[in-house]
Every structure is written in structure tokens, then in C-alpha cells.
Amino acid sequence: MLIKKPNVETPLPCCQAMTVSQSIRQTGWADLARRSDSQVLAILVLAVISALLAFYNLDFPYGIHPDEPIKVAFAAGQHHNYAHPPLLIILARFAGWLSGASVDHDYLLVGRSVSAVASVAASILFYAVLRRHADSGNAFLWACVFAISPAIAVHAHYFKEDAVLVFAICAGLHALVRLKEQVNTANLVYFGFALGLAVTAKYVGAGNSLVLFVVAIVVCRLSLRQSIIVAGTDALTVVAIFGASMLTEKGSGLSTVINGLRVELIHAEKGHDLKEWFWEGYGLTHFRYHLIPSLTLPTLAIALGAIAVAIIADRNKYVAAYAGGAFIWLFMLELSPLKLVGQMRYILPVVVYLLLAAGIACSRSITPRSRLAAIGVGLVALVASAHAGMAYVANLDRQTDTRFEAMRFLEKQGITHFVVDYPMGEPASITEDYRDLSSADYLVSLKFQRYLRGGGLSGQDQEIYELAGMFRCLDSHVAAQFSKPYGDYGYVAPTVRIYDLRGARSCILQNAP
């Protein structure tokens, strides 16, 4: 009778076991190296894509953005008025010093380049944050959607604080996810530094920093000592940047900073000449007129759909957190009267949080159901964003811009007696008082849409209704109109009307503001 021996594995010799162990370790290191290489490649490709669009048409005509001349003066050494924090100006002054800037045009290009570089850096940080929550494919795809969206691509061109604020917000989120992974001194200091950058980029960034700080205390379970490190680094960053600003200029001090902050708070409370208060029925202005064109309708629809699936069906907490951040930003912006249709810069923080939520949702909720569907909707969003982003940036060119088309029309027609009501990028007589039109035969208007819209809103100042009536009367005296399908977006190709005033004197206000 045969007796079977137990199936006992023969132990490997010591040297062979070590060889197997080393092989496993080598395989693990090789996989890690491949993943690291793929991430570096993704970042490089993303940076190139973002930079190509951010620097394209960067030398568009000076003067079409009304806020750039004062920024150029600040960068050249004039003391800051601190209606905005000084981070952008400090960076521009430093870049100007490095490049040897000496004239206004040099400082203009330096300031615009700071915004362009900030947008590229923001896109990289956006990818780094998203990669913490999403697979590599979706992270790269939605980071590209972010980088080439009209919101980011257009505002990368302006010597203005918005691109720097977007960078600071992305840095804060990146620092937060790193802190969640590991609470150590380096990450605490990085987090505090990022929070301070947001405060010095734009005053509204203080609210974002405060919320992220509270989230870090709760989610990362920071001790009192760790919280003090973050808060202290934040405060030191703010003091250092404001101090550097005052040291690189003459004629400013603490009183200048306080006065600038006071002026900005009054502006935020009272708004522009046209006011749309949320509680008076003017909600969703930012959503309808700014967020949709900033992302494009297909991209926004895909993003909201994916977010809905992730939150309702899968109850994904990360998607809910980022989508909640977008909602809070949008709600607070809708409460403010600072709403002028066409000025999209206010909703840039919403874009950051919303697209992060969309990328995570596609990775965590759409991909497990259908990878093909996730890739498909991501590509649709990418194509829609790329088409719109490139079209808007292309319209910054002098040959395609509506303002210069209008000026060429006037020159061709031999019209010399005209006034404009907004900067045109070329020398022209500008009026801020519509009573002062007696010497003009033609009015070139970029603001007519503002007042025609204001005439249909309740609760406005009487002057808004008077100006609306004037422009309605002038509707029958339009000599020419210039517009673009991809225009009326953040100073890109606004609709321009030329009114013939010679037969319309009765329309002109006698007691206009």
C-alpha cells in the first residue's frame, strides 16, 4: 500500500530566496519609477499646452484693459494704492528688475508674463491635486480642460491679480492634500505659506484661506502647536509681502494700506453703477453670464452631470467637498452687487473647485461604470474648452478685435468728430458724461449693453433708467456695429456700436450723470 507524502514545499536555498526578494523589490522600484516618469511627462505636456495658450497674443494692444495702466505705473515704482494686495506688483517689480525693464511697454509685458506663468503653475498644481484623488488619465484630461478653458486662458493675458489668485488657491489646495497625507513641519509651513499667498493675491483670498485653515484643523486633526505654525507662517508671509512692497516704493505706509482696504470694502459693498442684488431677484447672474461661457456649456453640463452621479449615487465625499467649495464661492459672489455682465474674473475660484470635483467624479464614478464613457465625455469637454479658449485668445489680436475694427471703419469713412465712452486701445476722445456730446457727430459705445440691461432691472439709480432711455432712443441711429461670436468676454472683442448723433440730438440727455 502506497502512502502519499504530505505536499510540503521544499524551502528555497538562502541565496535563491534573497534573489527572489531582490527581484520583487526591483520590480516594485521599476513600477514606481515608471509611474513617476509618466507623471513627469504629463506635467511637462500640460505645462507646454498651458504655456502655448497663455503666451499666445500676449502682446495685444496696450490700453484696451482699463486697469493695466495703473498696474504698469505701480510696477515701475509709483507707490501702490493697496486697493488690491501687492503680490502681483511685487512679482512684476522683481521680474522687471531681472529683465531690465525701463519703459511702460517693458513693464506691461513683464506684468502680463507674471500672469501667464502663474496660470501655467496653477495648471500644474491643479493636476497635482487632482492626481491625489483620480487616476492618471482622468487627472491629465481634466487638468488640460482647466488649463485651456476660457476662464484660465483669457485671464492669463492680463496684468491683473486674477491669475495670481488662481495660482494661490491651487497652491493652498495642494498644500492641504499634502498635509492630509502627512502632518510634518515642512507641510505645515508650506500650507501656511500658501494661505498667506492667497491673502496677498487678492483680499477675497483671505476668505478662502480661512476656510482651508478650518478644514485642515478638522480633517488633519491639527494640534494647537501645529495650528500656530500654520497661522504664524501665514501671518509672516502676509507681513513679508506687504513689507517688501512698501520697501520697493516711496510715499506709502500703513495708513495707505488701511485706506486701500477701506476703499475696496466700500466698493464690494456698493458695487458698480449697475447693481444686481441677489435678494432682489437677480440671482444666478454669475452662473448664467459668466460661468457658462468660462467653461462652455458642454463642459459645464458634463461636469455637473458627473458630480451629480458621484454625490447622489456613490456619495463620494471628495467630490462633495470640492463641489461644496464651488457652491460656496458662487453663492457668496451672487450675494455681492459686483456683477457687470462680461467681467468674468470674479468666478475664477468657482472654476478651480468645480473642475476638481468633475475630474474626481469622472475617475471615481464614471470610469468604474464605463471607462469608454468617461474618456468620451472628458474628450468632449476638452474639445469644447480648447475651441472656445483658443477662439477667445485669438480675438485679442489687433486685426480681429472689434474695437480696432470700429476705429478702422471711422478712419475709412473719414469720420473725425467722434467720442468714445470706454478705452479703445487707440488715442480717442473719451467722455464719462453723456451730456458732453455737443461737439461730436458720432458716439462710439462699448457701454450701451450695460445701460440697456440696467433699464430692465428694478432697484437701480435713476441715472441708469435715464441712460437706458437714451440708448433705446439711439437704437434707430446705429451707423455700424461690430461683434464676434467669441467676444464680450473679459475685455475680449466687446460689441461696439457707432451711433450717428447728427439726427439724434433729441435723444441726448440734458441732465445725465
Image: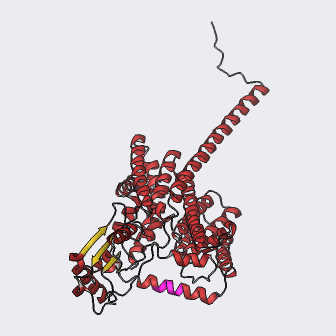
Give the residue furthest to the top.
Answer: 1
Residue 271 drawn at (x, y percent): 41, 82
Q: Is residue 112 magenta?
A: no
Q: Which residues are magenta?
A: 261-266
Q: Nearer the viewer, residue 371 or 406?
A: 406
Q: Nearer the viewer, residue 235 or 272?
A: 272
In the picture, which quadrant includes the N terminus? Answer: top right
Q: Is residue 355 visible?
A: yes
Give the residue furthest to the right.
Answer: 15
The residue located at (30%, 81%) in the rendering is: 441
The residue located at (68%, 39%) in the rendering is: 29
Marks counted in the figure total 0
Q: Is residue 264 magenta?
A: yes
Most common secondary structure along the magenta stretch: helix
Q: Quadrant of residue 504?
A: bottom left
The residue located at (40%, 61%) in the rendering is: 400
Q: Nearer the viewer, residue 31 or 452?
A: 452
Question: What colour-coding does the image apply?
Answer: secondary structure
Residue 78 drawn at (x, y percent): 62, 82
Give the answer, above or below, for where 316 lies relative to 491: above
Q: Quadrant of residue 431?
A: bottom left
Residue 156 drawn at (x, y percent): 51, 63
Q: Quadrant of residue 2?
A: top right
The residue located at (68%, 68%) in the rendering is: 100
Give the answer, above or below, for where 242 lies relative to 376: below
Residue 512 drawn at (x, y percent): 31, 90
- Residue 129 placement, left or right of 454: right
In the picture, which quadrant includes the C terminus? Answer: bottom left
Q: Is residue 203 visible?
A: no
Q: Nearer the viewer, residue 506 or 186?
A: 506
Give the residue furthest to the front.
Answer: 414
